[in-house]
Amino acid sequence: MSVPQPSPFPLVRLHAVSNAHNEWVALAFEWSPGTDNVLQATLTLLNYPDALSALAPLDCIVPLPDPRVLEANHLASLPPHRVILRVPAVALLDEAMQKKCGALAEAGYRIMVDGVAGPAATKAGARALLFNCAAELPPALSLVAQPGPHLASHVDSQARQAECRAAGFSWFMGEFARHPAEDAASGDGTSRKRLLALLGMLARDADSRELEQLLKQDPALSYHLLKLVNSAAFALSTPIHSFGQAINVLGRRQLQRWLQLLLYARQQDEGGVNPLLPLAAVRASQMETLSKARGGDRDQQDMAFVAGVFSLLDVLLGMPMADIVSALSLDLDVVRALLERTGPLGELLTLVEQADPAALDAAGIDHETYWQGQLHAYHWAIQVSRNL
């Protein structure tokens, strides 16, 4: 039996970068282990049809281990107003590297130093610092030398995010959205019961009047629904003022999808948006796209969407996923995916959470199809965040 050949198409994981209000400002590229030519991989993906348009207006933070390999013919694919070049701090110890980065900075490129480089960063024209804040914070003076914005990576809780913000960081990357403060996810019991009731209605395709009655009991959800249907996303000539009108405009299928996402739209206590919202949108959209790529029919694509959007409910509600699933009437494949990451939907959900070349091959999904799914998912999540 022949051994499968590695795909020539690069495999990348995109990490959302947020500001202090939990709004996405950039996407950081992390290459799959074994990617030989990082520059060529970057050019391949950014030259992909409509890639930069799909990810607009977010900046793309791309690793550049050796800036000296970047030649004039490469720059057309790396527009300086969209691309931030991430250079290892150790590379800037070399004077030739400093000169190359300085020239790129003069040409309008933003240089982000990965680590603490001291005076070398200034000589290289760097404007920002990226620092792994999992275990420690950088020396205070290292953030003062460049104007920023400085990016804290590996920020794995909202408590740590607050510490990084106090230290001078204004951009954040990590799993903090999935690890809120102890009291942030729980909310009040009445609100959680109402959300579970609404999810149950959606799962059993309840009558529109039942949905309308429950929506009237939740001012925040009602506000977001009316805001959505009156947004530019629907471009209606006549404003919508009632829940009944909103339901009719959206249609049953779209109503279910938007309400599932609207559950994540509640504001945080400090006024920022819920960082789970765009993550849930990415998962739902990518699951749907991959299901379609594997030949799934419309019903299967819908179940894939549900599995993706519901996969963060345990974080949102501060409840065990088993308790949430037991309160809903979900398809068995969705239940298996959410509880065990097994079955066809569980396989896709695992790939969306962490792409692995071997797992992609086993699922029959090539790297280019996976990249197309990422582009579509992030584009949709960006639009969702704008409209909600």
Image (tube, rainbow, N blue to C red):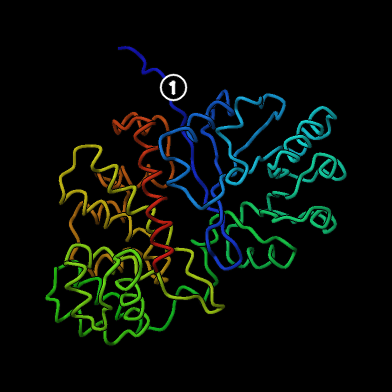
Residue found farthest to the right: 119
The N terminus is located in which quarter?
A: top left
Residue at left offset 84%, top offset 45%: 122
Residue found farthest to the bottom: 217
**Vertical placement of 160 versus 353: above or below?**
below
Q: Position of residue 169 (x, y in %)?
A: 70, 60
**Which residue is label 1 attached to?**
8
Viewer-side residue, 252 vs 264? 252
Q: Position of residue 51 (x, y in %)?
A: 44, 40
Viewer-side residue, 152 vs 192? 152
Secondary-structure class at tag 1: loop
Residue at left offset 70%, top offset 53%: 135
Task: Determine the image quadrant of residue 294.
Answer: top left
Q: Is residue 313 left or right of residue 297?
A: right
Q: Is residue 71 left or right of residue 273?
A: right
Residue found farthest to the left: 207
Q: How many marks?
A: 1
Q: Position of residue 156 (x, y in %)?
A: 58, 57
Residue found farthest to the front: 237
**Vertical placement of 303 versus 343: above or below?**
below
Q: Position of residue 250 (x, y in %)?
A: 21, 68
User: Disc 1 marks which amino acid?
Assistant: Pro
Task: Determine the image quadrant of residue 4.
Answer: top left
Residue at left offset 29%, top offset 45%: 289
Residue at left offset 73%, top offset 43%: 113
